Image (cartoon, rainbow, N blue to C red):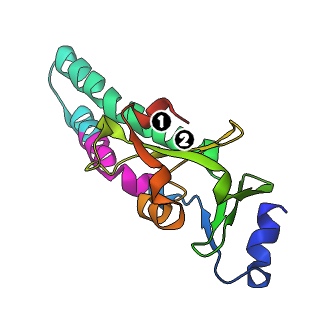
Amino acid sequence: MNKQEIIDNQHHLDSMYVTYNVRFWRPISSGFSIIILFVFTFYLLATNTGSFNEKTFIFFFMLLPGGLLAYIFNRYLACYNQVLQVSEANDTFYFGDDRLNKYNKDDIGRITIYQPGGVKKVHFFYVFEFTLKDGSMLKFSNMLISEAAVLNNFPDDLVSYGNKSPFWRL
């Protein structure tokens, strides 16, 4: 079953299934503070009439939020066509890019949630790693599904929070 068939034939599926797609507003909203910082430093660079050293300093200061924005946009491009269909009441779920694969919740060995700084208070960028009992892994970010939706739809006893940065996990 490909992504378009799933979306077009949604009424044929069990109404208990919820379909999650990557939306462009999710990376924009998750990086909103970075966007503001980038625009502000760009404005400072454009309006600065100071010396070459001042402009160079502002330019290098602008590279940090610019690099983070490029990373977020790159992550979006890497996973923009992911689809997850899940139901709280059903033991099966579907995940994939162009072709959805069927998985069973009983086959999940561990769910690891990675977040910046490893603290639960930071809600900027998450990576979810589902390690299946056969050793395979499913990886996706909060651009696809929120932490709350993962906690509601999958067994709580399998969830742990990783202490490593999520930025290189995908």
Residue 3 lies, in percent from the top left, at 77, 62
Q: Is residue 30 magenta?
A: yes
Residue occupying image coordinates x 74% and y 72%: 7
Judged left or right of residue 53, residue 5 is right
Residue 5 lies, in percent from the top left, at 82, 69
Task: Report the magenta residues as a range.
Answer: 27-40
* Residue 127 visible here: yes
Q: Are marks 2 and 1 in contact (CB under 8 Å)?
A: yes
Closest to the observer, 47 or 159: 159
Residue 142 — which label? none
CA separation in Å, label 2 and label 1? 6 Å
Residue 69 lies, in percent from the top left, at 42, 39
Residue occupying image coordinates x 54% and y 45%: 110
Identified by mark 2, the residue type is Arg
Kindly identify which residue carries mark 2: 75
Judged left or right of residue 54, residue 126 is right
Taking the view exactly as shown, the residue that stands out farthest to the top is 53
- Badge 1 density bin: few <14, some 14–19, many ≥20, Cα 10 Å: few
Closest to the observer, 88 or 17: 88
Q: Is residue 57 magenta?
A: no
Residue occupying image coordinates x 65% and y 57%: 106
Q: Quadrant of residue 44?
A: top left
Taking the view exactly as shown, the residue that stands out farthest to the right is 1
Kindly identify which residue carries mark 1: 71
Q: Secondary structure at mark 2?
A: helix
